[in-house]
Every structure is written in C-alpha cells, then in structure tokens.
C-alpha cells in the first residue's frame, strides 16, 4: 500500500496500515523529555486505561507547555490501540489544549 493509499484509507476509516501522524519535540523542550518517556507514551496508549491516557496527556502539557504557547502535540496511532484509548487521547488533547490560557 502506498502512503497516498494509506492516507486515503485513514480519511475514510477503511483499515489503513497506520494512522499517519508525527510527534515532534521542539529543540528547546528536549531537556524536559527523556527518550524512555517517549516509549512510555506508546505503552500507555496501547495497554493503559483511558484514565491513564488522560493523565499522560495532562502531564505532558504541564511539563512541556507554557503561557507563551508553542507546544504542538501530534500522536501516531498504530494498530492495536484500543478505540476507547484513542477516544481518551483525542478528548485529552482537546481538553488540555487551553490549559495555560
């Protein structure tokens, strides 16, 4: 499957190979975020509860965000992540988007 075909399948929710998203940490934030914490992110979303997913996103916003803005959160979803955790992830990203306002 090409990347274009995968993107189109994603848009229409038709069994894509993966959800095309990226996670980028701005260089000025790298000192706040260890590599093992990035691995934890995938583990919690795949095996954790919706409450743990919400707590994870909140902790990331508190740790990396600021009143000045600049935090961009994007998450790569892969097969095997429970639908309720995907929903919790999206809800948490919306809920905490205005945390510092």
Image: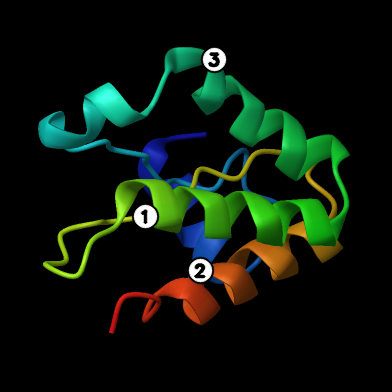
* Mark 1 residue element: loop
C-beta proximity under 8 Å, tags 2 and 1: yes
Crowding near pointer 3: few (<14 within 10 Å), some, many (20+)?
Answer: few
Disc 3 element: helix
| Side of 97 where 69 appears, left or right | left
Q: Are marks 1 and 3 in contact (CB under 8 Å)?
A: no
> Can residue 37 be seen at all in this image of the molecule?
yes
Q: Earlier in the sequence, mark 2 or mark 3?
A: 3
In the image, 77 versus 55, the foreground residue is: 55
Mark closest to the chain's N terminus, 2 or 1: 1
Q: Is residue 73 above or below residue 24?
A: below
Q: Work out whether mark 1 precedes mark 3 in sequence or the reverse, and give the earlier one.
A: 3
Seen from the viewer's position, the closer of residues 36 and 82 is 36
- 88, above or below 18, in the image: below
* Quadrant of the image occupied by residue 10: bottom right
Is residue 14 visible in the rendered image? The answer is no
Tell me what residue is drawn at x 59 percent, y 21 percent.
39
Label 3 belongs to which residue?
Answer: 36
- On-image quarter of the C terminus: bottom left
Q: Secondary structure at mark 2?
A: helix
Q: CA distance from mark 2 to mark 3?
A: 21 Å
Query: Which residue in the structure is indicated by mark 2?
Result: 93
Which residue does the numbered mark 1 point to in the structure image? 73
Mark 2, Cα crowd under 10 Å, few <14 / some 14-19 / many 20+, is some
Residue visible at 58% across and 40% down?
18
> Looking at the image, is 6 positioned above or below residue 32?
below
* Residue 35 falls left or right of residue 80: left
Q: Which mark is residue 84?
A: none
Mark 2 touches mark 3? (CB < 8 Å): no
């Amino acid at each position: 499957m090409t990347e274009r075909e995968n993107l189109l399948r994603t848009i229409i929710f038709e069994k894509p190979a993966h959800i095309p998203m990226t996670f980028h940490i701005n260089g000025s934030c790298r000192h706040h975020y260890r590599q093992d914490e990035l691995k934890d992110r995938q583990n919690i979303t795949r095996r954790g509860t919706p409450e743990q997913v919400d707590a994870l996103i909140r902790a990331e916003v508190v740790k990396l965000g600021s009143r000045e803005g600049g935090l961009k959160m994007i998450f790569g979803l892969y097969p095997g992540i429970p639908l309720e955790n995907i929903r919790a992830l999206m809800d948490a990203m919306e809920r905490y988007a205005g945390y510092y306002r």
